[in-house]
Amino acid sequence: MAGLPRAIEPSRLVARRTAAGLSRAELAARTGISPRMIYFYEQGRHTTTPSRLERLASALGCEAEALAGVPQGQETLSDLRHATGLTLEGIVKLLRASAVGRELCVSESQIAALESGLPVEGQHWQDPEVTGRLLATLAKAYAVPMRMVLDAWMRTRPRDPVPVLHSAPMPAVSQAPLEVWESLNERQQIYLEEIMRDDRMTETEMWMRRVQRLPGPPATQWRKLPLALRAAPSVVGYTRLQERLRRRGLHDPGTGQTVHALERRGLLVIVEDSVEHPGAGEVQRVLVQLTRRGRAAARAGLGEPRPQAPGTHLLSEWLWGVLARVAAAEPVGLESDALAGRALFFIGVGYRNKRGGRPSRGLVDAMPVQAPGGTHVAEYRWRLTPLGRRHLAEYLDIYRELYPRVDTAGLSSSSSESS
């Protein structure tokens, strides 16, 4: 295995070369590697040989490990520091310039112990509130998202208390949406309310399609809700939204006047297209879409608080649903094709959603299953990584409160940690 090519993490090579004050041509002269090839390494377009990796490391005054990247979603605290080219002395200097660094009396020996998973001597190092503030400073120093530092911390120190990250406080509720709602007449309020309800029903339908891995239109399309067909109702019937309004005692003839009044207030947008109807042929269709202002006014009118956004270290409802599916399949795991799709680029080891985009969190991985007798790998199955199990154990109750629609029956924090 030692003779296999090893991938260079491009950002590490660039950071080390820049820190050394070398141009590509100067590094090329020191290593005997062409400037063009060094450019390719820094762009991630070529994989180096073991001998070239050693020559590059020697020329930059570092170990080969400092240049060789790890798969996306497996980074440790040491990996994050090496990727920036910072020495222990360099990161300690940056930390000591912060309030939390001074509170912890940060030293090189402490950071070395932190990155090695060893006990860190000193006050407050076991206080999750304090280490949570330290994460923010490390994220700024390493120029990565805070959740990436949190994940690296949990990989490096699996038995330590998890640093506490607090969500940003919600801004004070504005009276403006409520004033907009109260300025509407009763008919307009009912229309806005029912459009909001239909929007939510459609959102739930789209969410269920994603859970069942069925294709569906993007939000830019399904947010446009069918309101009416420009043909006789006796032929084309009523749309779901019209039926909702009719049950509230509002008759169809006044639809146009009411929705245009709401559009003039900036509460919704009206668009038209044409569809093929089996009984009427091609007919014009009227669609409505709530604006942000309209959505806020409807929430205010329904007496609902502004929705709380999850912390940056937590998953979206969609990704949490995927993670819960993998967790429910433990310890056997899901079939290799069960997670085909974009989710892997956010939570699968070794993935990145796009060049320069945010790296995967590495919460799930494809694990080999040996054939009877151990003669060969029979298949791969998706299972939680150690970080995935820790993430589930730490945040399961929070996710259940945030996303009650996601099925988590059978999941528990204690069983996640012991899997």
Image (tube, rainbow, N blue to C red):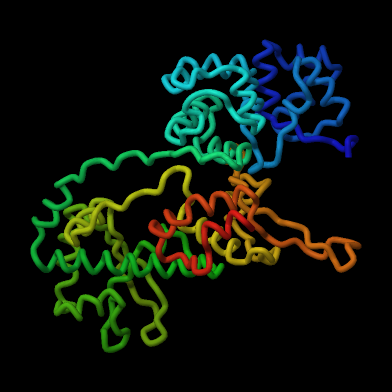
- The answer to whether 10 is drawn above or below residue 223 in the figure is above
x and y percent of residue 309 in the render?
37, 48
x and y percent of residue 408 in the render?
49, 65
Q: Nearer the viewer, residue 280 or 261?
A: 261
The quarter of the picture where the N terminus appears is top right
x and y percent of residue 137 in the render?
48, 26
Residue 357 can be seen in this image: no
The quarter of the picture where the C terminus appears is bottom right
Residue at x 87%, y 68% (from the top left corner): 372
Q: Nearer the viewer, residue 386 or 143?
A: 386
Q: Is residue 413 left or right of residue 231?
A: right
Residue at x 84%, y 23% (from the top left corner): 54
Q: How many marks?
A: 0
- The answer to whether 199 is drawn above or below residue 69 in the figure is below
Residue at x 82%, y 31% (from the top left corner): 48
Q: Quadrant of residue 358?
A: top right
- The answer to whether 286 is drawn above or below residue 247 in the figure is above
x and y percent of residue 364 in the render?
63, 53
Residue at x 10%, y 59% (from the top left corner): 184
Residue 355 can be seen in this image: yes
